[in-house]
Amino acid sequence: MTSSPARIFGLRTILVLVFAFLYIPIAVLVALSFNQGGLPTVWSGLSLKWYASLAGNAAILSAALNTLIVALVSTAIATLLGTLLAIGVEMRRQYGSGLEALIFAPMIIPDIVLAVALLSFFSMLDFTLGLHTIILAHVVFNLAFVCSVVRARLKSFDWSIVEASADLGASAVTTFRRVTLPVILPAVVAGALLAFTLSVDEFIIAFFTAGAGRASTTLPMQIYSMIRFGITPEINALATIVMAVSITALTLSQRLNRGVIGQ
């Protein structure tokens, strides 16, 4: 069945409008980060001074370091635990909807609910809030995303090669290192990049589980504290950098994941 030219034109117009609605505000944000003037509504010329200003802002540099620490540590832990969880679940091969719900609940539960729950949990254990509690909180929801990506690869994994490795006398550690891991490695890397992206962008859970002061302030929290006093080109520059890092990591994750699913 062929579509009429008018129908095709209408669908393309809708597509263009949707993409314009999604990406024009982002394009404006990026453009204004290079605006020489301080007024967000008046273009005064091209300049990199707002990016240079970020390099000399101690509060932003501290927040950036905290974000990097939280993202790297939480990603490493979530990747390890999520990969082991995915392997354990798929090796079992028989699991009900209850187990599926427990694994993926952190992905479905609203951020505000999960944030309040984690804050209550840390308070019950009398934990002092800080970077360590933000890391633990990020591991909770990142673990589910890593598990999901790795399980997508394990769906097509031939478990007979694991049994063959065991029959040949290889230990479980050797089998995992030389047989299982090389096969699922692209999915593990894709899950790690996705976890890193989510950790860098996450605000609500970090806001609830962070301690007082600059020592546990992340970049999203810093942006929120700055934006309360109005939008400035410096905030636009900071948001552009965060967005660029997130898009890069997410793009790499999607490419790796696309290759994994296609195998």
Image (tube, grey):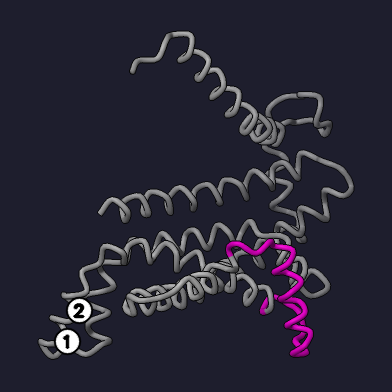
183 on left or right of 51 = left
Res 36 quadrant in image: top right
Callout 2 amino acid: Val
Along the viewing direction, whichever of 251 and 166 lies nearer the viewer: 166
Give x and y (percent) for residue 173: 27, 86
Residue labelled with disc 1: 166
Mark linked to residue 162: 2
Q: Which residues are magenta?
A: 107-132
SS of the residue at dot 1? helix
Tell me if 162 is positioned left or right of 237 in this view.
left
* Front-most of residues 23 and 214: 23
Q: Nearer the viewer, residue 196 or 3?
A: 3
Quarter of the figure that contains the N terminus: top left
Is residue 112 placed above or below 16 in the rendered structure?
below
In this view of the protein, can residue 61 be seen by the observer?
A: no
Q: Please tell me in which quadrant of the rendered image residue 190 appears.
A: bottom left
